[in-house]
Image: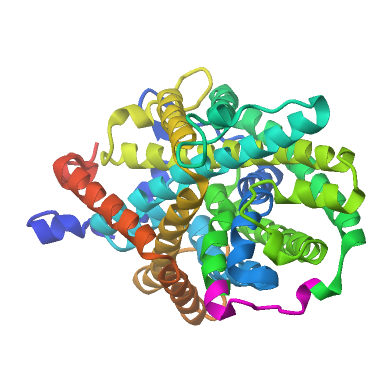
């Protein structure tokens, strides 16, 4: 197709990057190239690694007070919203297999300004998600240390300001450990993540086996105590637990057969994760009255102690959670670096983010900068607000993906697609509507934070990316 016009401000804001150029540049960075080493198994594990653990091990205690026993319904609603968007992601990932994920999809279909807005939302989604999950890691680490050694890290060093602490040291440590794995290479990181995913699935199945022994049907009598508004609010908070398939799409330039494997990995991981989330949530609420979920970020370990009357199994679960949440940090941090890699290659953020180390085939400087930023954020900001900020950024980006898949169908119907969204444009429209509905369930403070974030992003774009975009200069 002919390149988008670049004369005039309006035309420059709407300039699109041809799909063929996006794909041709796949893997290319400053001074090196990303290595294609990931197959279907590794991509599926990246999806599950980035998803499974966050909502169950960390945010369940935050969501139950909003929805009551209907938190299981909140997980289903969040999963259904994710499913509609996942279908659109699967089609676009198979058609445009690049690292930019929804940022690149928007660039090819809706123009540079929309792509920037989407990419800026992804920076919020991934960066803040890493920090939010890292905060919860410290809670389970303390559970593990208490059960195994009888000691805990003082609140001053294990909680962020506002939650009774001064500096969350464990949160910083887990981000730095993930950074070390990522610096070693994509294949090595994927291998470590696969081991951690197997451990956390085993830990959750263990919880279900023991927790069901304390199941009381009376805990479900008042199923929806706060009404549908509470369920939708909980669903919006829990939605950030479903961003794993988005992380898989960021591996498009390191997959051996991205067009075939990415759609499969996205759908397979979403089915597995949703089933486990709903199962564990149902057992947890059945074993503990919803009023006793007081916002604890280590709720599952507490339930294990209540059911067994001892600390052993709770300690075992805490060990599984420590590994599980570490894998979420690893894979989501990976996704963040690859989003910035794609944006840097397009000239919209500084070139340092697209420099590839020739020996490891990884964006080393990018990984260092992002890890240090996320680590400090995790150590200094409370979890609840982080989770909500992640949700709104995720929902906005997913809404754009549902639009992008319809636009590409209309503008490039001849392109080969390894996966097609069924009943299009109905299902993408439903995905868009669900995302907008769940965004409306978030509170005014979260919307305020989002508004400020977007304003800062637009200022950065017009001062930097607008003129430095590679589409603003002759193609090299």
Q: Is residue 284 left or right of residue 310?
A: left
Task: Say which quarter of the image contains residue 444.
Answer: bottom left
Q: Residue at x 84, y 51 (%)?
A: 306
Seen in the picture, residue 112 relative to 377 is either above or below; the reply is below
Q: Is residue 318 visible?
A: yes
Q: Position of residue 61 (x, y in %)?
A: 64, 55
| Front one among 394 and 264 | 394
Relative to 321, is 146 above or below? above
Residue 97 visible in the snapshot: no
- In the image, 476 versus 251, the foreground residue is 251
Colour scheme in the image?
rainbow
Residue 470 pos. (x, y %): 23, 41
Tell me what residue is drawn at x 8 percent, y 55 percent: 7
Rendered residue at 26%/39% (across/down): 347
Q: Is residue 125 left or right of residue 282?
A: left
- Determine whether, in the image, residue 25 is placed left or right of residue 82: left
Is residue 65 within the magenta segment? no
Task: Please give the range of residues in magenta.
Answer: 219-230
Q: Quadrant of the N terminus?
A: bottom left
Q: Would residue 34 be found to the left or right of residue 83 on screen?
A: left
Residue 397 picture location, percent across and down: 41, 59
Question: Where is residue 9 shown, x and y percent of the image?
Answer: 9, 56
């Amino acid at each position: 197709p002919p390149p988008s016009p670049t004369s005039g401000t309006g035309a420059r804001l709407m300039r699109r990057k041809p799909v063929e150029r996006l794909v041709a540049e796949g893997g290319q960075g400053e001074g090196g190239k990303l290595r294609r080493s990931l197959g279907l198994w590794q991509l599926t594990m990246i999806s599950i690694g980035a998803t499974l653990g966050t909502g169950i091990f960390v945010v369940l205690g935050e969501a139950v007070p909003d929805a009551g026993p209907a938190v299981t319904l909140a997980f289903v609603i969040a999963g259904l919203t994710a499913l509609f968007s996942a279908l659109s992601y699967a089609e676009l990932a198979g058609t445009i297999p690049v690292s930019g994920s929804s940022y690149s999809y928007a660039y090819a279909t809706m123009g540079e300004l929309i792509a920037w807005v989407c990419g800026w939302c992804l920076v919020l989604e991934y960066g803040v998600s890493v920090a939010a999950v890292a905060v919860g890691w410290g809670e389970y680490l303390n559970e593990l240390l208490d059960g195994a050694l009888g000691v805990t890290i003082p609140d001053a060093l294990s909680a962020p300001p506002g939650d009774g602490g001064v500096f969350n040291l464990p949160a910083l440590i887990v981000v730095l450990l993930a950074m070390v794995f990522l610096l070693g290479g994509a294949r090595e990181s994927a291998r470590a993540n696969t081991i951690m995913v197997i451990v956390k699935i085993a830990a959750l199945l263990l919880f279900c086996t023991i927790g069901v022994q304390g199941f009381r049907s009376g805990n479900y009598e008042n199923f929806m105590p706060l009404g549908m508004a509470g369920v939708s609010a909980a669903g919006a908070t829990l939605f950030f637990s479903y961003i794993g398939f988005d992380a898989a799409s960021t591996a498009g330039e390191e997959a051996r057969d991205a067009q075939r494997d990415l759609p499969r990995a996205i759908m397979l991981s979403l089915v597995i994760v949703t089933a486990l989330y709903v199962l564990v949530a149902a057992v947890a609420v059945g074993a503990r009255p919803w009023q006793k979920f007081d916002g604890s970020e280590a709720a599952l370990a507490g339930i294990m102690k209540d059911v067994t009357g001892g600390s052993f199994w709770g300690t075992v679960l805490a060990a599984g959670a420590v590994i599980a949440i570490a894998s979420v940090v690893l894979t989501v941090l990976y996704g963040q670096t690859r989003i910035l890699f794609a944006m840097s290659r397009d000239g919209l953020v500084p070139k340092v983010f697209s420099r590839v180390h020739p020996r490891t085939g990884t964006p080393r400087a990018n990984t260092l900068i992002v890890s240090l930023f996320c680590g400090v954020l995790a150590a200094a900001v409370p979890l609840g607000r982080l989770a909500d900020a992640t949700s709104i950024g995720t929902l906005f980006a997913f809404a754009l993906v549902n639009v992008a898949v319809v636009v590409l169908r209309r503008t490039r119907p001849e392109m080969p697609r390894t996966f097609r969204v069924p009943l299009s444009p109905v299902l993408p429209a439903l995905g868009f509507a669900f995302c907008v509905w769940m965004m409306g369930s978030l509170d005014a403070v979260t919307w305020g934070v989002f508004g400020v974030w977007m304003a800062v992003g637009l200022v950065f774009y017009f001062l930097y990316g607008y003129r430095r975009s590679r589409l603003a200069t002759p193609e090299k």
